Each structure stands twice: as structure tokens, then as C-alpha cells.
Amino acid sequence: MAITKIAVVGFEGFLEDYTITHFRMPRIGPVMMATIIRDLGFNVKMFAEGVKPFTKKYLDYIISADLVAISVLTYGANKAYAMTSLIKSQNPGSIIIVGDVHATIMPDHTLRHCDYVIRGEGDETLVELLSVLNVNNKVDTESLYRIDGLSFWNGDQIVHNKNRVRPTNIEIIPDLSLIDSFYEHSGWRSWIRGRLTLAVAQASRGCPVACKFCLGSAILGRKYRTKGVEGVIENLNQIRKASNNRRLNVFFVDNHFFIEKSWTKNLLKRIIEEQYNFDFITFGQYFVGRDEEMLKLLRTAKFEVIFVGFESINPSTLKEFNKRQSESSMRECIQSIHENGIDIHGSFMLGGETDTIETIDATLQFAMEMNIRSASFFSLCEYPFESYSFIPTTNCLPPYRLLPKENLDFYNLNFVSIYPKRMRPSQLQAGLIKCYQEFFTPSRLLSKDSLKFGRRAKARLFGYWAQRNMVKQMQRYISFLEGEEQGKYDSDNRLIEGRLDRAVPVFKNPYPHLYNKVYGICSDIFSAEKTASSVFLNLPESETPEYAD
């Protein structure tokens, strides 16, 4: 068939998430996908659930498209599957492609719900696939076999082509204006809604640090690839023009912004020359605090905050995670970063093999003592890799230590999805709740430090607002964890691995008809799905997935 209309769809999870609750922010992958498709001459529109929930108007466009390209992470997979079910029921001839992290690590599971899976970085795979699909006669199956990085159906058999070599040309400029409604919200509306609009940009790919638990280096590789400085500036100029030069937060979503120091400094100097009306955020390691020149450039360029993965202050856990750092060096660099007028969002990963309840308390104390602006407290997570997922697994934990084994919604780092070794899952979950509640307290919002630095008070206010509903869901989840952990831990809260079920997990979608009501298709099945979707959290009616509109 000739393809004339394409929809690109980016999904988020059903459960509350600190980032998506806090920000109106698309993920960079689907924006790249939409831009590539547009540049090939297709009529394309993108819908990002992290920007605006899917409405009847959105679904009308998506369902009527000749091809739908979906980008999804594991915790949003059930939503994506529900969307593909609706599309196929209303437009059986539509072609559905799914890519991004979840499709890469679980290609067979994903193919139950779509026609094609793109594994890994899809820049080149997508172009080649569209050239084969956009014909007026039957798809040439032999041509599909020649597309690296593609998984597809041949009759009733699944075919996995060989991996594609990661692209070296990453100069594509993601066009955020392709996202419906992205630029339409003003600053005061964001305050009322309790969400900040974040434009995303990417200047590099890959991360040589390779933290053991991180899928970033597994998907994007350890080899660091940078864009040309002028290409990044062109990207920022595009954002400035599309936003009418209004004050905006721009997030560089690179795994690590400071790997090639001379390149980063050259880019920062060009950003300073352009005098953008932006406040920048970026990911980076804490050791940027040792580079005084870099810090001064960052501050002058209006980099407001660095998102730093401290992960742990437990020396054994740091070694386990492949983090070559110490608490003393972290404290020294945090002080240096603060002295240069830059704030820090700290990320902490709890639940390592030597972590205990005491580790959680010490981590919280560290975050508060160092007066970092905001923080995320996550549970260590291993993902349900398929043996044929074609990327190295993180190898944090064996698959039989995954929890729960029925629902993918909980693999978002906020909900404990593993059996920790030296504390019960319920204890780890309670520890995460404690960290959020004590870090984002009203007294800290009104502290002299917060009031002295207005942006710090603003960030903590948003953090306090963002974590409230998430914590409520985490609290409801504890009763499920308490049931699952019974008989699997000794009196010292140590895991007895021999008592764990070694059966392969069977993940099911508890709400396959999630978007039917939004689209206007109603049936008695919703009452059954409401029960299924609430089985872990005992959600009240107002929070069940039926109310996605």
C-alpha cells in the first residue's frame, strides 16, 4: 500500500512518576522518529502522552493513519498494547511499528501486538523499512530480511534480523513542533497545573561510564558520539523560534554531557554567544565539580541544574554498580558545584546486594546534609529481558528475582520490582516513601536556604507537589509486597533465594481496552478491567485506567 498519513505516538506509564508528574516533557526518541519521517516527505503528526493525554481527537487521527509508529518504555507497554488493540479493531489495514527500549529488550512479547519491531537505535532501520513498506503492491518479504535491527512476522513465524551497527551520524535535529500542543502552554498555566514545560535536546549519544544497572549504555553503547556544535546551536535556535523566544526550560537528555570536555566547553561558549532565554538542565557526573572552567561556563550559559546519578553512598554498592567514586569525593564536588551557583538534582538507587534499611536512612541524611535542590529515590530494577533481546542485559539480578511477574506497569523504578537481598521488598518500598516525604517537607520548602535561592524553593515546591500522588500509590502497593515476600526471608530480613519461584514470568495486560471509552466504544468489559487494573493498588474509581481521558 502507498503510505500517505503517519502517526507517531509516545507513551508514558499508568502509575504516577516523579518526572512525568512534574514536567510536560516528550521523550527524545519518538521526536527523532517523527522528524525522520517528516524529512522523508510523509505527512506525520506526533502525540506525546507526557505532554497531553490522548483525547478523542487524537485517537481519530491515530486510528485513521496508514502507519502508526509507537515508542514505549517497559512501564508504558500495557498502554501501548491497548492502543494497538484499538487501532487494529478499527483499522485492520493500518501498519504498526514499535520501537525504543521495551521493544528492544522484549521483541517477541511486543510483536504479539504489532507488525514490526525496530530494535536499538532506529534512525536508519526506520528509513529502510519505510522504503519497503511504501509501495503499491505486496510487501517484498525478501527485502525485509536485509534490514538490520528489524524483527517481523513472516506468516506465523517471528524473524529477528541481525543487529544494526550503531549510527555514527547523529546530526538529525528533533523538531518539537511536530508534537501536537507542545508549545501552546504559557508559564502561568504550567504553575496552575503543577507541571513545568521542558523542551528536550540531545547533543551526544552513548556513555562510557556504563553503570551496571543502566539500560542507557546497553541501548546506546559505551562509545561516545557527539553532534557538531553548530548543529546543536541550530537545534536550540529552532526551539527559540518555535517558542517565540519566551522563557523556557531546555533539558539536554544526553546520558552524560561532560565526557569530551573540550567539545562541551566549545558548545557552552556558543550557547553563551547566542544569549538564549532558556534555563538549561543536563545529566552529568558529579566530578564536573573539579573543573572550575567548566562550572563557570555552565553558570554563564544559564545551566540551572545538573541531574547527577550519585546512586549510593554505600562503598560496596558503588562497587557493585560499577561507580568509581566515594562519599568524600561526592561531598567535595557538590560543594564546588554549589559555590559556582549551580544546583543539583540527585538520583539515588537503593536496593543493592549489600544495602540494608540503614543504607536508606544514611542516603536520605546525605541528600539533606548536602542541601541538593531536589532528589529522586529509586528502587534497583532489573528488567524482564527476553533471551533473544539482542542487547547485553544489565545482569544486575537473575530473572527469578523479578517482582511482580504479571504486570509491566511496575517497572518504573518507583515501585519495588525485585526481591532485595538484605531487606524485604516492603521495607525497601517503605524506605523510598520515607525518603520522599522527609526530603520534600513543607519546612524545607520554607527554609532560609530555599527562600534565599528562589529557584531552589520553586523546584522543591514542584517536587513536593509531584511526589504526593506517587507516594499514595506506593503506600497502597506495600500490602501486595507483604503478601509476596511471605516465607521468602529469614528473621534477619535476608532473602532465601531457594524459596523463589523459578518459573518464567507471564506478563499480561490488565486493561487491553483502555482507550475504547475515550474513543467512544463502550461495553460491559470495563467493569472487569477496572478490577484487573486495581489488583495491586486497590485504586479508587477515580484513578482506574478507564479514566484515561
Image (cartoon, rainbow, N blue to C red):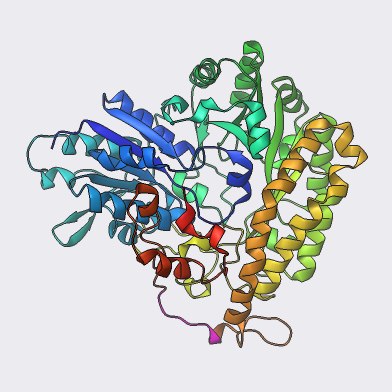
Residue 369, can we see it? yes
The magenta segment: 499-504
**Quarter occupied by residue 175:** top left
Q: Nearer the viewer, residue 453 or 14?
A: 14
Q: Image height check: is 240 above or below 167?
A: above
- For image coordinates 43% across by 43% down, the residue present is 54
Residue 377, can we see it? no
- Specify the farthest residue to the right: 448
Residue 36, image x, y percentages: 34, 29
- For image coordinates 69% across by 68% down, the residue present is 428
Q: Is residue 420 magenta?
A: no
Q: Image height check: is 352 above or below 241?
A: below
Q: Nearer the viewer, residue 146 or 290?
A: 146
- For image coordinates 51% across by 32% down, the residue present is 204
Residue 447, image x, y percentages: 90, 42
Q: Is residue 503 magenta?
A: yes
Residue 313, image x, y percentages: 76, 57
Using residue 424 as the reference point, say whether residue 254 is left or right of it: left
Residue 488, image x, y percentages: 60, 85
- For image coordinates 86% across by 38% down, the residue present is 450
Q: Image height check: is 254 above or below 441?
A: above
Q: Quadrant of the N terminus?
A: top left
